[in-house]
Amino acid sequence: MNFELVTDTSSNLVDDVIDRFGIHVLPLQFTIDGVAHQSYLKGEKSDLKRFYTMMRAGKTISTSLPILSASEETLRAILDRGSDLLYLGFSSALSGTFQATALLLDQLAREYPERKVLYVDTLAASGGEGLLVYKAALMASKGASIEEVRDWVEDSKLHLAHWFTVDDLMFLFRGGRVSRTSAWAGTMLNIKPVMHVDDEGRLIPLEKTRGRKKSIQGLFRHMEETALAPVEEQTVFITHGDCLEDAEALAALIRERWKGIDIVINYIDPVIGAHSGPGTLALFFLATGRK
C-alpha cells in the first residue's frame, strides 16, 4: 500500500480488520456522568457491555467532537514518514466530526504540498462507514492507488445500505431524532421502527413494526429485496448495542438464505450507541441503493 487509511471510531471496525490493514482510527469522545472517555485507544479493549449496562442504569452520557490535537498528532506522523493519506469519515449529516477533520486535513495539505491528502464524507455511520473502509483497505492491499480507492468510495457509498432498528425509542428522543410524543406512543404500543440512512447521510424512520421479531425480519427483508448479486459473495456487517443474540439471529436468517456469505458482527461504539441506545441492531450490505 503506497498510502495509509484513516477513519474514526464511528466506523465500528473489529480489531482484526484494523490490525490486518494498519488502519488508523481517530478516537471520538464521550462522557459518563461528567467523566470524559475516548471511544478508541489502540491496543486497549473497551468494555462495551459495561457501557450499555450503564446506559440501562440511567447514567448521563453525552458525546463531543474528536480531540483535534490527538487527531493532528496521528495525521502528522503519517505525513512525516513520507506516506500519503486517505481519510474516510463519519456522515457529516449526523456529526461535525467530518467537517472538523477535513479542516485539519486542508491545513496539513498546505503544510505538506509534496504529499497527497485526500478525504471522503462517506455519508455513512457505524458498520456502513466501516464496510466502506474495509472495502477500501482490501483494494489498497491489492495495489489500487489512493485516487482509485477514493473514487471507488465516492462512486459506491450510496450503494451501501444501512438498515437498523432500536429497542427503546426514548434514546432517539433524547438525541433529537424523534419527538417525545412518538417516543412515548411507540414505547406503549411496542413499536420497533425500521430505519435507514438516506442519500444525504441522515437518519430516516421508514417503517413501524410491532415487536422485536418483526423488526429483525424487516431488516432481513430489505436485504433480500435490494442486495446486489451475487449476494453470497458479499461481506455483510452487523452491529449491535449489546444484543448479541439478536445479531446472531439476524445472521442466521442471512446464512440460511445465502450459503457461505461472510458476516462480521461487532458492537456499536459508545458515540453512536449513546444516541441509539441498548438493543440497537443494524445491518449493512451493498445494494441497488440505500433504500
Image (spheres, grey):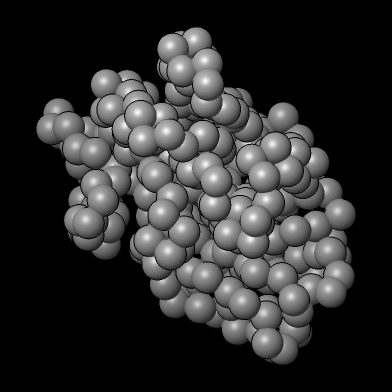
Q: In this view, does 61 lie to the left or right of 109?
A: left
Tell me if residue 234 comes above or below residue 123 in the rendering. Answer: below
Q: Position of residue 110 (x, y in %)?
A: 50, 10
Visible residue check, residue 208: no
Residue drawn where x is 75% and y is 39% of the image = 151
Q: Where is residue 37 in the image (x, y as percent from the top left)?
A: 19, 38
Tell me if residue 159 comes above or below residue 184 in the rendering. Answer: below
Query: Number of labelled discs?
Result: 0
Residue drawn where x is 55% and y is 79% of the image = 249
Residue drawn where x is 26% and y is 51% of the image = 42
The one nearer the camera, 98 or 196, is 98
Q: Is residue 15 left or right of residue 166?
A: left
Q: Is residue 96 left or right of residue 159?
A: left
Q: Where is residue 186 in the image (x, y as percent from the top left)?
A: 56, 47
Q: Is residue 207 left or right of residue 249?
A: right
Tell me if residue 133 comes above or below residue 115 in the rendering. Answer: below
Kindly indicate the quadrant of the structure image that contains residue 65. Answer: top left
Kindly indicate the quadrant of the structure image that contains residue 73. Answer: top left
Q: Where is residue 21 in the image (x, y as percent from the top left)?
A: 46, 59
Tell me if residue 61 comes above or below residue 24 in the rendering. Answer: above
Visible residue check, residue 114: yes
The one nearer the camera, 31 or 277, is 31
Residue drawn where x is 80% and y is 41% of the image = 155
The one nearer the camera, 50 or 6, is 6
